[in-house]
Amino acid sequence: MAVKPDAADLAEITKLIEEKKIQPVVTQTLPLTEAGDALAQAATRHTRGKIVLRMADEPTR
Amino acid sequence: MQNVLRILAFLCLTTAATRPNATRAQANGRVMTAVVAHQYGGAEVLKHEKVPIPEPKENEALVRVIAAGVNPADPLIVSGKYAKEFGTRLPLIPGYDIAGVVEKTGARVATLKAGDAVYGYPLMRGGWAEYAVVTEAEAAAKPRSLTYAEAAAVPLAALTAWQSLISTARLEAGQTVLVHGGSGGAGSFAVQIARARGAKVIATASTPNQDLLRQLGADVALDYTSAKFEEVAREVDVVLDPVGASSSVLSRGLIQRSWRSTAFAAFRWR
């Protein structure tokens, strides 16, 4: 079985997030310039939670 | 245990690999910064380059990416080890998860419009860039309670956990699930999704991450450096293995089939 993009499944996940039943565990937010470091960490397969790369500031709304 | 139903959910295995931004961009004159690999390898092959902003096809939306997730699939793809299976070609832009704002949409896109805050899972289209294209099936409205950075951590890992636990293993309330690597990317979602489903959750992690397992809602947190799987496994209905750790269970003779270590496996135990 392949993990596949599925809007219905993603909607279920969105619902659980809105209900505060699940919350992503982001342990590091790195600038895009640190993509190499992020890739190397992911390759260890021992990251705690998730690493995220940031391209732009959060929009104000 | 002879009746183990085996399902492998190979991270991001699909046959519908499409060409990455770097090779299918249109000449619309606008450029963006992207992380590009021109050869297969490790972190050393990644370059930051100006490349054309991709043009959405009629069933796609162009998203201005605010944040992008990092997944175990990224180093696998960049390594080239699965180039044949995934249909990847060079140059490629890694990145499977994005959160951002819709910039424009193709003619046949009905549910997304310019200005929408979205998150999604653009398969093989390169999320580690300032812009990326997604189809409607690959995107949803960003949860309002999350920042873009938080939302970018969700799609691939949460879909992997959801599709393995719910779609494949059909976890039900009252059942017990063993989640290997419960503090990792997919594992941390699996623990929470299983709890939300009403299952009892036994989760494993290394010593420093035992507290995180409990915060996520695991009923039983096990230190895999010292856990005795034989004692817990007898009570388990479903095993979820994002880290290939079931080999340690397998080696103890609890189940008889073997799995590829890079696979995300979910299976009915009994």
Image (cartoon, coloured by chain):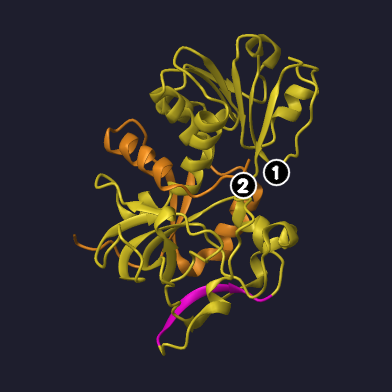
Q: Chain of mark 2?
A: B
Give the residue displayed 65% in from the left and 52% down from the top. A43
- Give the residue number, with chain letter if any, for mark 2: B11
Q: Which residues are magenta?
A: B30-38
Q: Colour of chain B?
A: yellow
> Residue B238 lies in what quarter of the image?
top right
Above or below, comparing residue B127 to residue B256 in the picture: below
- Give the residue number, with chain letter if any, for mark 1: B262
Foreground residue among B173 and A19:
B173
Q: Mark 1 and 2 residues: CB-CB less than 8 Å, in contact?
A: yes
- The span from disc 1 to disc 2 (Cα, nearest Å) is 8 Å
Label 1 in the same subunit as label 2: yes
Foreground residue among B204 and B86:
B86
Q: Is residue B222 magenta?
A: no
* Residue B73 in sight from this viewpoint: yes
Q: Colour of chain A?
A: orange
Residue B170: x %, y % from top left? 53, 24
- Which amino acid type is shown beneath numbered disc 2? Leu
Instruction: Identify the image quadrant of the C terminus of chain A.
Output: bottom left
Query: Secondary structure beneath disc 2?
Result: loop
Foreground residue among B29 and A61:
B29
Residue extending farthest to the front is B108
